[in-house]
């Protein structure tokens, strides 16, 4: 009987120990579950923050690419028009050459002088054309305030109203940008 009593005592002792372990395990599991939930929330928050930062980075990269393209375009535009001031300063000399060539026909003895000046004029114009200068053709064209400056209006049988009769001063384009308006007479 002593054996039975000792077995019974052992089982009584084991049962409370097992129930104690179950009671201890339950709070530990709930602590672990809370910790897991907390970590999952932190992970979710960090993933959301990462996504926001990634989106910001992509936007900044796109913004920088646009800025880079814009500044490159502006730089190329500045390079193309860098000689604008020089060319504008040379235009009065070209005008003087044009006037000389118009009136040189009056003197028959100056044919060689006229040829020499014409050659100089052609050389200067070739250099300027290589730099992007173009002469505007105005006579017979419709008046355009973006390209022409009307000096006056006159009656004309040769062209319709609003078209250019004659040109007093040539207009010029530099890389398709008007740098000097043509001074013209316009038909009424």
Image: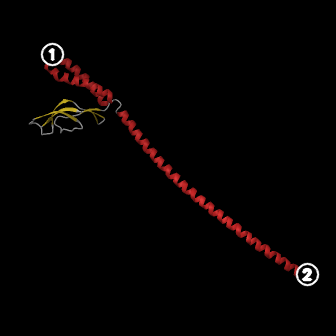
Q: Quadrant of the N terminus?
A: bottom right
Residue at horizontal 48 percent and vertical 50 percent from the top: 58
To which quarter of the image does residue 68 belong?
Answer: top left
Label 2 CA crowd tier, 10 Å (few <14, some 14–19, many 20+): few
Whether label 2 touches label 1, CB < 8 Å: no
Q: Which mark is residue 47?
A: none
Residue at horizontal 68 percent and vertical 64 percent from the top: 32
Q: Is residue 49 above or below residue 11?
A: above
Closer to the chain start, of discs 2 and 1, is: 2
Q: Nearest the camera: 83 or 17?
A: 17
Q: Quadrant of the C terminus?
A: top left
To which quarter of the image does residue 73 belong?
Answer: top left
Residue at horizontal 21 percent and vertical 35 percent from the top: 148
Q: Is residue 116 above or below residue 178?
A: above
Q: Could you say whether the residue bearing mark 1 is in a helix, strand or loop?
A: helix
Question: In x, y percent, where is residue 88?
Answer: 29, 28
- Give the CA separation, mark 2 to mark 1: 156 Å
Q: Which mark is residue 109?
A: 1
Which of the two marks, 2 or 1, is nearer to us in this view? 2
Say whether residue 34 is left or right of residue 166: right
Question: In x, y percent, where is residue 69?
Answer: 41, 42
Query: Which residue appears farthest toward the bottom when viewing the image?
Result: 1
Q: How many marks?
A: 2
Question: In x, y percent, where is residue 125?
Answer: 27, 27
Q: Could you say whether the residue bearing mark 2 is in a helix, strand or loop?
A: helix
Question: In x, y percent, where is residue 85?
Answer: 32, 28
Q: Which residue is mark 2?
A: 2
Query: Which residue appears farthest toward the left when viewing the image?
Result: 157
Say whether residue 160 is left or right of residue 130: left
To which quarter of the image does residue 21 belong?
Answer: bottom right
Residue at horizontal 76 percent and vertical 74 percent from the top: 19
Say whether residue 33 is left or right of residue 90: right
């Amino acid at each position: 009987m002593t054996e039975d009593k000792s077995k019974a005592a052992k089982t009584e002792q084991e049962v409370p120990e097992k129930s104690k372990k179950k009671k201890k395990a339950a709070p530990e599991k709930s602590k672990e579950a809370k910790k897991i939930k907390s970590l999952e929330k932190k992970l979710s928050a960090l993933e959301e923050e990462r996504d926001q930062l990634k989106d910001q980075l992509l936007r900044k990269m796109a913004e920088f690419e646009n800025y880079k393209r814009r500044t490159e375009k502006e730089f190329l535009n500045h390079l193309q028009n860098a000689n604008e001031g020089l060319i504008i300063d040379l235009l009065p000399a070209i005008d003087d050459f044009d006037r000389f060539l118009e009136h040189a026909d009056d003197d028959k003895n100056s044919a060689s002088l006229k040829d020499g000046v014409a050659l100089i004029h052609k050389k200067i114009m070739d250099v300027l054309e290589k730099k992007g200068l173009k002469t505007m053709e105005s006579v017979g064209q419709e008046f355009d305030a973006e390209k022409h400056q009307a000096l006056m209006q006159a009656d004309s049988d040769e062209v319709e109203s609003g078209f250019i009769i004659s040109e007093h001063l040539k207009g010029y384009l530099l890389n398709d940008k008007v740098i000097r308006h043509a001074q013209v007479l316009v038909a009424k």
